[in-house]
Image (cartoon, coloured by chain):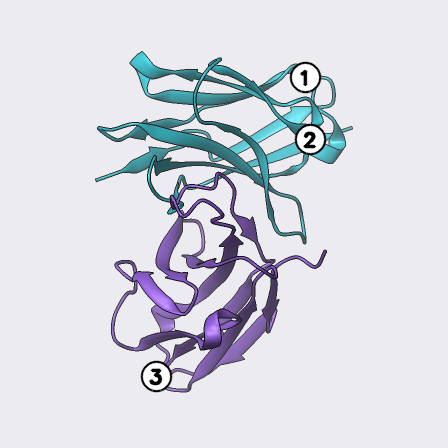
Amino acid sequence: EAGVTQFPSHSVIEKGQTVTLRCDPISGHDNLYWYRRVMGKEIKFLLHFVKESKQDESGMPNNRFLAERTGGTYSTLKVQPAELEDSGVYFCASSQDPSGSGTTGELFFGEGSRLTVL
Amino acid sequence: AQSVSQHNHHVILSEAASLELGCNYSYGGTVNLFWYVQYPGQHLQLLLKYFSGDPLVKGIKGFEAEFIKSKFSFNLRKPSVQWSDTAEYFCAVNARNTDKLIFGTGTRLQVFP
């Protein structure tokens, strides 16, 4: 079974440019999460999709960040325009929710997309 | 607000040494507790988890963790580390009705042969 895949693995852009990160969750996983780790700090929650709906986007830093999940499959996270403080590793994770309880016990993570804004 | 503290940022050990990584959390309700590990060049993966029952939890690769409710702690232990345990370790917590994880800052473990 394929795991969570993320693309690109590393992106270097200049301040003011746009970057789009993509995440393909494990097939059949309704829950999809985006997290971010700024260097040396904790991994922070950004948002949570259940299928194509945003369940919780309380962690999104500001309106320069836009996340979508087309048809409840893959997700994209766009940063426009990028700022220096957006540099970090963006992790995507997915999980099953067979019972609908919202508690499945394990998130499966991708390898992350490292974003460097110069 | 929920938070997780990992007091050891960088730990250096020789092979066969014992390991204990501290984790304390702050949350008023019932929580699930996790340790994730990220080996160099790999994705985050679950090491072990605690939901309920026996507070001593055993995970993969000989790791275990003990939940001490009175201390809000979930320390990770391994009696004898190996070079292959070199990785970054993250403690995390979520509230019982959500998968949303709150992570600590991580502990980088280096094990020398």
Kindly identify the residue that appears in the image at 67 percent across and 36 percent down.
B86
The residue at 41%/70% (across/down) is: A52
> Which amino acid, by three-letter code, is at mark 2?
Val
- The outermost residue toward the front is A99
Position above or below: B58 against A54: above
Please tell me if label 1 and label 2 are on a single chain.
Answer: yes
Q: Are marks 2 and 3 in contact (CB under 8 Å)?
A: no
Residue A2: horizontal and vertical position, in percent? 70, 59
Depth check, front residue: A100 or A36: A100
Q: Is residue A102 left or right of residue A21?
A: left
Q: Colour of chain A?
A: purple
- Point out the frontmost of discs 2 and 3: 3
State the CA–CA distance, disc 1 to disc 3.
Answer: 48 Å
The residue singled out by tag 1 in the image is: B17
| First reached walking from the N terminus: tag 1 or tag 2 | 1
Q: CA distance from mark 1 to mark 2?
A: 9 Å
Pointers 1 and 2 in contact (C-beta within 8 Å): yes
Q: Please give the letter of the chain rendered in cyan.
A: B
In the current view of this chain or complex, which residue is farthest to the bottom? Answer: A17
Q: Please, which chain is the residue tagged with disc 1 on?
A: B
Q: Quadrant of the N terminus of chain A?
A: bottom right
As helix, strand or loop, the secondary structure at mark 1 comes to: loop
In the image, residue B65 lies at what x, y percent? 52, 20
Q: Which residue position holds label 2?
A: B111
Residue A118 in sight in this render: no
Tag 3's secondary structure? loop
The residue where tag 3 is placed is A81
